Image: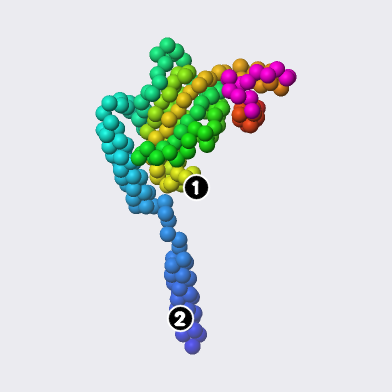
Amino acid sequence: MKYLKNILCVILVTFMVFSCKQSQEARRPISHTSGSFMKKSAERNKKLIATEEEQIDSLIKSNPKVKYMASTKGYWYTYVVQNDIDTITPKKGDVAFFNYELKDLKGNVIYSEVELKPQTYAVDKQNVMTGIREGIKLMHKNEKVIFLFPSHIAYGYHGDDKKIGPNQPLVCTVTLHNFISEVAFKKEIQLRESGVLTPVSNEAPKTQTKLVNKIKDTLTN
């Protein structure tokens, strides 16, 4: 009788362990970082980039009189106004002053220069669209350049939650008015704060006030 009870106990324990194991395995979450998932995601991204590049290529071919150059950073650009005299371009440690406009590939204005207002930008120290961050570093003072940005260096798959949709390539026209060193910029700020009416980088003081304060905080941090 005692032997039979021992056998029953062993069977019961084995059944409980097996049931527990099954329950644990059933609750195991599906891993989205699996090789299969990552591979499919990479393939989707490649197809998306290829589709956007085809759209941009069609735009370039639609007007053969305009010569676009391909950048190693993944965008295309053409000069509207080119400065052949200056050789220096903005770099980290400079403050750039520019205007820009955004359109879709059909030429519809998404954001005008008036809406976006004059920009004061600490090069490589502030969060701006990747395309602008890279593109502005190839420009000379007083140049105007049209950039064609695929979505992955524009606003990506999120868009801007306003006028720019997910995965939307953009036509971006940038006018770089000037750029100066952070040291020179800080001196101009001191002149303004001391009461000397010296507009920063020849921009209207009222227009620049908020931007100056913002970039001042950036350079202080």
Residue 161 position within the rendered picture, expressed as x and y whole percent measured from the top left? 50, 47
Residue toward you, 1 or 171: 171
Which residue is painted at 30% across and 25% down in the image?
Answer: 67
Residue labelled with disc 1: 161
Q: Quadrant of residue 14?
A: bottom left
**Label 2 vs 1, first from the N-terminus:** 2
The CA span between labels 2 and 1 is 67 Å
- The residue labelled by disc 2 is 7
Q: Give the total of numbered labels.
A: 2
- What residue is at 43 percent from the left and 46 percent from the top? 165
- Secondary structure type for disc 1: loop
Query: Magenta span covers which residues?
Result: 194-206
List x then y, in percent, for residue 91: 50, 21
Residue 221 in sight in this render: no
Q: Is residue 81 above or below residue 4?
A: above
Camera-side residue of 89 and 191: 191
* Residue 152, placed above or below residue 64: below
Q: Residue at x 63, y 20 (%)?
A: 199
112 lies left or right of 40: right
Which residue: 45% across, 40% down?
A: 110
Q: Is residue 154 magenta?
A: no
Residue 21 sits in which quadrant? Answer: bottom left
User: In the image, 10: left or right of 50?
Assistant: right
Residue 181's disc is: none
Residue farthest along the top direction in this orientation = 85
